[in-house]
Image: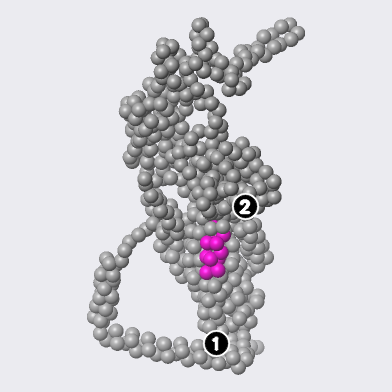
């Protein structure tokens, strides 16, 4: 009969617990993102691949631009009114407009100008104002006072620039010059150059400056008007009444309907000269000279010593500037073989598409060179090619994902956006290095690859998230700052940097643990060639010397605690004098120079 069990026997008789993986008692909802990435590699892998594919598609389709799209908060109201003195324009047109538009909400200042051609009013609003709503309200207020303005005003323009025909800055400017006189070749240039260029997709408008279409001009002779005792207004009203083309309605019969239209337009210049002004047979040619010719030019251009014609090309708001400029340039080169344009020299002196490509190319080279340097520095510290490749993989992934978000927001790839991507390159590897280093620490302790990846990434997950969010918070004031011309540009920079940082955080919490768990070797000290051994000894020795000096300096500061704050205050105060002496200019420097001579 067995005696009572001893304590040792009782310990042996206890059932052995079933081994299980650590932290399996938690539900999947409590797992960290690195643990989910390791346990569900197919799901996380497909999500990452989908993001890369969408980002790659967006990277190809992103429209290129020079600067972020921003609308100047100003509106121009222009009222053409010829043959009037500036005093009359100011009294009859500008003052009513100023009284009607001066009480608009968000209006900062108002500026007006009067001359013999009409009046102009410029309205400046606060940045961030919805200009589409402002334009609607301006038109409504102008319509309310239209009855108070002179009756013979033809049109009132509400535009975004001084020129009613030009709403956006031109993307291409050039000159046309020839040994022959082009000042009377408007029809030829319009048919052979303007119309073909306007048919290019994305081109909104093509303008010629220095040549004007022919027009009928009626030059009244004051002496003849007085001798025949006829009023100028009577002549003007009779001309307008004799030149019209309008519909009169529809006449319906039981089985037929007729559309009536009266046609009373002049067919040639001679009909205008023969227009009868009175019952006594007085004709327009008796009191006026009627000519059909180009109007006199108010200014001129020259190219290589020859009279030149300016040409400007404007693009649509949603068009790709680079693509449109390339197609316009190709079409211009093809015009050289046209026999009707023989001897016409076409010089393109401003090509925004070329400037955009050159700027983006320089920034892209800077970004690639910076990424290569960051990879070399990582290799010097990690001393493993596979680990470096995994850490560096977060750079292209983050950039591609950020481009996808930029494309989804309907924005463009411009110099500021690319600059934001370059600024973020230096911070993209921070999260990956922290996670990789902690995973290495567990691998050197002899843990398996998956366990090292899970523990190493989970332990620093909170720290990595906090560090990334602190970097994002620094750029948040750029995004939510008070709108201004400079802040709207810096907003694009802040949004781009925040997107890249958040993408790098996603990589460090998913791709890094997943890659290290399945690809990274668990050997703590892999074999190396002689160059690798020398590199390791050099790096380790250099780090040891730096650490030794750092400990010595730290001990000195702990013994003399007053030294550190005093030195820090002196260094900070010493920056005040250089800061006050430095010239402060927040505007972009122009690379063009113009010389103007007034005579």
Query: Where 14 falls versus 228 (above or below)?
Result: below
Query: Where 543 falls versus 454 (above or below)?
Result: below
In this rendered view, identify the residue nearer to me: 429 or 164: 164
Q: Quadrant of the N terminus?
A: bottom right
Measuring 58% from the left and 57% from the top, which residue is drawn there?
Answer: 404
Measuring 41% from the left and 43% from the top, which residue is drawn there?
Answer: 73
In this rendered view, identify the residue nearer to me: 426 or 238: 238
Q: Is residue 453 left or right of residue 463?
A: right
Q: Which residue is mark 1?
A: 7
Q: Is residue 6 visible?
A: no
Mark closer to the chain start, 1 or 2: 1
Nearer the observer, disc 1 or disc 2? 2
Q: Which residue is mark 2?
A: 329
Magenta range is 356-367
SS category of the residue bearing label 2: helix
Specify the label residue 588 is tagged with. Answer: none
Measuring 48% from the left and 20% from the top, which residue is drawn there?
Answer: 288
Measuring 63% from the left and 43% from the top, which residue is drawn there?
Answer: 193
């Amino acid at each position: 009969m067995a005696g009572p069990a001893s304590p040792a026997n009782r310990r042996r008789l206890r059932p052995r617990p079933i081994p299980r993986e650590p932290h399996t008692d938690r539900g999947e909802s409590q797992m960290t993102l690195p643990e989910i990435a390791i346990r569900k590699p197919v799901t996380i892998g497909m999500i990452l691949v989908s993001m890369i594919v969408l980002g790659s598609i967006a990277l190809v389709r992103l429209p290129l631009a020079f600067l972020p799209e921003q609308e100047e908060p100003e509106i121009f109201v222009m009222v053409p009114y010829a043959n009037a003195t500036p005093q009359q324009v100011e009294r009859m047109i500008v003052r009513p407009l100023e009284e009607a538009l001066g009480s608009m909400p968000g209006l900062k200042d108002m500026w007006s100008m009067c001359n013999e051609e009409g009046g102009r009013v410029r309205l400046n609003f606060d940045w961030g104002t919805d200009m589409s709503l402002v334009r609607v309200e301006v038109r409504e207020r102008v319509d309310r006072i239209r009855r108070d303005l002179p009756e013979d005003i033809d049109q009132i323009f509400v535009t975004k620039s001084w020129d009613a025909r030009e709403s956006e800055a031109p993307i291409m400017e050039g000159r046309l010059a020839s040994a022959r006189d082009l000042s009377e070749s408007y029809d030829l240039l319009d048919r052979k150059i303007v119309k073909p260029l306007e048919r290019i997709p994305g081109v909104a408008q093509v303008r010629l400056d220095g040549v004007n279409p022919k027009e009928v001009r009626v030059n009244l002779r004051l002496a003849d008007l007085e001798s025949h005792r006829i009023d100028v207004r009577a002549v003007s009203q009779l001309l307008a009444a004799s030149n019209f083309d309008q519909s009169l309605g529809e006449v319906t019969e039981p089985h037929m309907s007729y559309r009536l239209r009266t046609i009373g337009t002049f067919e040639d210049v001679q009909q205008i000269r023969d227009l009868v002004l009175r019952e006594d047979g007085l004709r327009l040619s008796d009191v006026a000279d009627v000519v059909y010719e180009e109007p006199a030019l108010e200014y001129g251009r020259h190219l290589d010593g020859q009279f030149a014609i300016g040409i400007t090309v404007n693009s649509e708001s949603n068009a790709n500037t680079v693509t449109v400029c390339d197609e316009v340039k190709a079409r211009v080169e093809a015009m050289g073989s046209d026999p009707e344009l023989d001897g016409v020299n076409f010089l393109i002196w401003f090509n925004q598409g070329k400037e955009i490509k050159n700027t983006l190319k320089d920034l892209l080279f800077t970004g690639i060179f910076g990424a290569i340097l960051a990879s070399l520095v990582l290799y010097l510290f990690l001393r493993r090619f596979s680990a470096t490749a995994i850490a560096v993989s977060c750079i292209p992934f983050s950039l591609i994902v950020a481009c996808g978000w930029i494309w989804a927001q309907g924005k463009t790839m411009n110099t500021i956006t690319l600059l934001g991507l370059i600024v973020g390159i230096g911070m993209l590897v921070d999260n990956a290095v922290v996670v990789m280093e902690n995973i290495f620490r567990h691998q050197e302790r002899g843990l398996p690859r998956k366990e090292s990846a899970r523990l190493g990434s989970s332990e620093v997950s909170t720290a990595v998230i906090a560090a990334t969010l602190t970097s994002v918070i620094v750029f948040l004031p750029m995004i939510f700052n008070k709108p201004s011309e400079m802040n709207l540009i810096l907003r694009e920079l802040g949004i781009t940097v925040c997107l890249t940082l958040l993408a790098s955080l996603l990589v460090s919490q998913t791709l890094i643990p997943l890659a290290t768990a399945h690809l990274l070797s668990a050997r703590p000290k892999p074999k190396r060639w002689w160059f690798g051994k020398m590199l390791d000894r050099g790096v380790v020795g250099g780090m040891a010397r730096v650490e030794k000096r750092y400990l010595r300096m730290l001990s000195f500061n702990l013994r003399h605690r007053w030294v550190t704050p005093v030195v820090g205050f002196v260094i900070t105060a010493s920056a005040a004098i250089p800061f006050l002496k430095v010239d402060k200019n927040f505007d972009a420097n122009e690379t063009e120079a113009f010389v103007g001579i007034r005579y």
